[in-house]
Amino acid sequence: MLERPFSSSTTSLPSPNDLVAVLDALDTALVWTDATTTIRGCNEAFAELLDKPSPDAVIGLSLPQLLPLRGVPAASHPIRAALLGNFPAATYQRDTLSGSHLSIAGYHAAAAGAVQAVLNITPVAAPPCRETPARLAGLQRQLALQQAKRQVDRQQRRQAEAILKRQMARDRLLSQVARALLNRDLDAAIDFALHAIGRFTRCDRSYLFRYSANGREATCTHEWCAPGIQAFIDESQQVSIANFPWTHSECQQGRAVPVADVADLPQRGCGTARMAAPIDPVAAARAHDSPQSDRRLHRPRCRAHPS
């Protein structure tokens, strides 16, 4: 390995061909330049760093403009200064599997055309090892697993952030509806609540039903429809509860009734075809707004509407 700069008083410098002959066997990248840092010669190892077919394809190129080389980090200021003619000895550490470093050895000479810079890739503690195919395959699998783990972590983080964002939006919605019920006229507050809930759940429609005094019928008193959706409030007056025994039973027990698909409803809960058709998922809720405990049923049909 050549690391000590030669002084200008050196009387005998190794010729480039001698250097190539010696260092080619050591798997060392070697290049020599003239005073303008134009490459005048190199060995096969240096040509491989540049992805060149042969050393002849490198001759005449400017060495500083080629940095960073393939597999070699960008030159630091000391290294670039060495290449431009100041010739301090310089070493640039890099972290690789083979544990090698980049070193520059400068050469002074009185005669024009003498060797001026040598670029070495040399081992720190031991010669670079040749990775076996099995070890390379193991490293590739390890890298693939690490990349897959990072991808899964990113997906889980995005999912958690989406859930948290949805929960925060729901809390804001509940707060807005509560304030509306306290501060607005009841009908206006109900209309606002149905609109807000319908947009939040991306529904086609939001309904509010009032039970009759005898509890045998329910009448739609308020309805919100998404743009382009036909209203059903006129067809939803004095609906017989007997048509919806299962949904009514769930409501009576104060439970919400989410249904992802009408086809999944029990046969006894589907009601008439006329009423079941516009209801995709059903969400039922029981509400109380008076000492007489008037019961109200909210039924949205959900699909992906823009918010």
Image: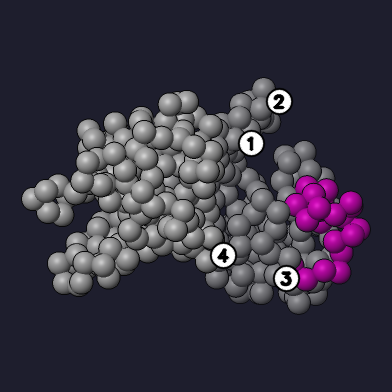
Q: Earlier in the sequence, mark 1 or mark 4?
A: 1
> Nearest the camera: 7 or 130?
130
Q: Earlier in the sequence, mark 4 or mark 2?
A: 2
- Mark 1 touching mark 2, by CB under 8 A? no
Number of marks? 4
Q: Would you place residue 148 above or below residue 289 in this image? A: above
Give the labeled residue for mark 3: 65
Give the labeled residue for mark 4: 228
Kindly report which numbered mark, 3 or 1, lies closer to the viewer in this rendering: 3
Magenta part of the chain: 42-63
* Mark-to-mark CA distance, 3 and 1: 27 Å
Q: Residue at x 49, y 60 (%)?
A: 231
Amino acid of disc 4? Gly
Q: Earlier in the sequence, mark 3 or mark 4?
A: 3
Q: Which mark is residue 133?
A: 2
Q: Which mark is residue 43?
A: none
* Mark-to-mark CA distance, 4 and 2: 64 Å
Residue at the extreme bottom of the image, as rendered: 36
Q: Would you place residue 24 above or below residue 229 in this image? A: above
On the question of residue 163 being in view, the answer is no
Amino acid of disc 1? Pro
On the image, the x and y values in percent for residue 33 come to 77, 67
Q: Earlier in the sequence, mark 3 or mark 2?
A: 3
On the image, the x and y values in percent for residue 108 come to 68, 69
Q: Residues within 10 Å of mark 4 (few under 14, many from 20)?
A: few
Kindly report which numbered mark, 3 or 4, lies closer to the viewer in this rendering: 4
Q: Residue at x 47, y 49 (%)?
A: 301
Residue 194 placement, left or right of 55:
left
> Nearest the camera: 18 or 236?
236
Residue 266 in the magenta stretch? The answer is no
> Nearest the camera: 77 or 173?
173
